[in-house]
Structure formats: C-alpha cells, structure tokens
Amino acid sequence: MATTTATTTTTAASALRSGLGGFLRAHRERLAPGDVGLPGTARRRAKGLRREEVAVLAGVSVAWYTWLEQGRVDTSRQVLDAVARALRLDDASHRHALALAGFAPAPGDARPAYDPELLAVLDSWPDSPALLLGPALDILSWNRAYAKLWPDPAAIPEARRNLLLLLVTDAPHQRLLPGWEPVAMDLYRHLRTRADRHPEADGFRHLTARLRADRPDLAGWWACRSVGDFAPRTVEIVPEGVGGSPRAYGITLLLAPRPQDAAILVQTPTQTHTAKPPAP
C-alpha cells in the first residue's frame, strides 16, 4: 500500500514538472527578442526566444533551464521568480507557474483591498485626471478624466499597470509628458522611501527587477539610494490628436492613511504655477 502511495505521489510530481516545463516553453515561444530588449536576427528558424537567451536573462545555466522545460528538475521559488521575470509573465501566469512548481502563494501576493471612499474621491474630480496607486505605484483605479487624457489603463496589460514603469518604458506616455524624467526620478525616490520601510514586500522587489531589466540604460537611476516624498509641481502635457498644444497641469501626490499605504495622484488643469488639488 505504501509503495502504491509513493508511486502515485512521484507520478503526480512528475506530471506537475512536465506541465510547468510546457507552460514555460509556450511563453518562451511567444516572446520576440525585441520584447526583452534583445536585437533580432534574420537567421532565426525557431519561433520565440532561444533557451539560452532566457537562461541569461534569468541568471541560470542553459543546461539547467533546458532540464526545467523538460520537466527533469525541481526549482526554488527564487529561481522560478527570476525565470518568470525573464519571460515577462503577468501576475496570473506567474501564480500559475508557482502552483505548478508546488509553491503556495506568498502572504504578500494578494492585492490589498482599498477603501471604496478612495474611489469615490477620484470620481468627484470630473475635470482632473486622477489615479489610485498602490504602495509600489501600481495603478489600482482611475477616473474618466484620466482615461480621456492618458492611455486608458484598461487597454494596458495588468502586469504593466504601474505608473513608474509606464513613464520610463512607454512611448505614448513619454510623448504626452515630454518632461517625464524629473517626474519619474521623483517617483522613484518616493518608491525607495516606502521600499526601505518594507523590505519584505514582494511588490517593491518585483518592480525594481522589472525596471532594471526593461531600462538597463538607466542603471544609474536604479542604483541611486536617495529617498524623498514626491514634490508637487506644474508640468506641460501635450494631448494626442488635432491641435496638440501643451496644457499646464499641477501634479500632486496625496497619501492615504495607513494601513492602506495607498496614494492618489491628481492632475489639476492650471494656468498658474501653483499646483493645488481640487477639494474632494
């Protein structure tokens, strides 16, 4: 009886490893070199990324990654997280890969619930684009004014709905805000302030790893240890479409009370250099 149970357990574990390998292989074949910042070549016969390219991006050996896709080895959560980042897995796919590898979701993986009153605050500003942001600057909600001026977050994959990530990697966002660099740097200082207070939080680590992978040319930014709260400022935004004349907006980051540790980024149309958020 014990032998039968052991055999069944071994077979189930083998099936999970095989399923994980097929899952990773399918995602690898969907990616183009340009998706991960690699140059394309005309001589590619196989579709997607090569195994050696994923291995380099994840920081593992080619032989080990090959065995992982073939279902021949077990893996640690830390290494699987690195592979997931290399393959640009979204949150749902990342959780599925962890489940196939036998890892339960970490306590910090679930998205926290936020007070519905914060969402009502966003809707109370019909002319002021506003975002509800999580501690790691993930975009949790937005109002109609924001979707009208900026690329609609609903059309952006959930794994990429992060304000800082979009400002430093997304061309449409950078065209709308030509002076995006100082805003992004100030947001990064704000992020570092929160990350140092919560070193155990996965959200900060995942975002930092994504920023380093997607914008290695900004390595000096990501190595910076300076911190600080986001300072209100007036910026010029160039709307898409006919006319496209710059408009002045005052940007303010309003911090929600703990334990939510959320924030609201509100952009107020202004003709002056005083950035004051509208009254809720």
Image (tube, helix red, strand yellow):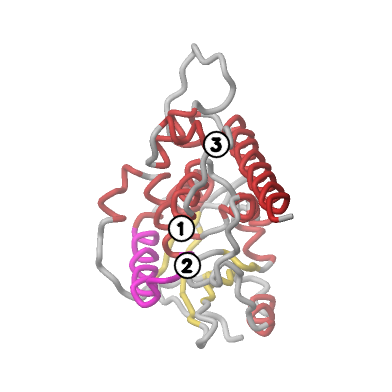
Q: Which residue is mark 1?
A: 206
Q: CA distance from mark 3 to mark 2?
A: 36 Å
Do the numbered discs 1 and 2 sit on residues whose CB atoms are within 8 Å?
A: yes
Residue 235 found in image quarter: bottom left
The percent coordinates of residue 71 (x first, y second) are: 58, 37
Q: Quadrant of the N terminus?
A: bottom right
Q: Which residue is mark 3?
A: 72
| Amino acid type assigned to the residue bearing label 2 in the image | Ala
Numbered disc in front, either 3 or 1: 3
Q: Which residue is mark 2?
A: 136
Q: Does the magenta run of residues contain 250?
A: no
| Amino acid type assigned to the residue bearing label 3 in the image | Arg
Callout 3 crowding tier (Cα within 10 Å): few <14, some 14–19, many ≥20: some
Callout 1 crowding tier (Cα within 10 Å): few <14, some 14–19, many ≥20: some
Q: CA distance from mark 1 to mark 2?
A: 9 Å
Do the numbered discs 3 and 2 sit on residues whose CB atoms are within 8 Å?
A: no
The percent coordinates of residue 151 (x first, y second) are: 61, 52
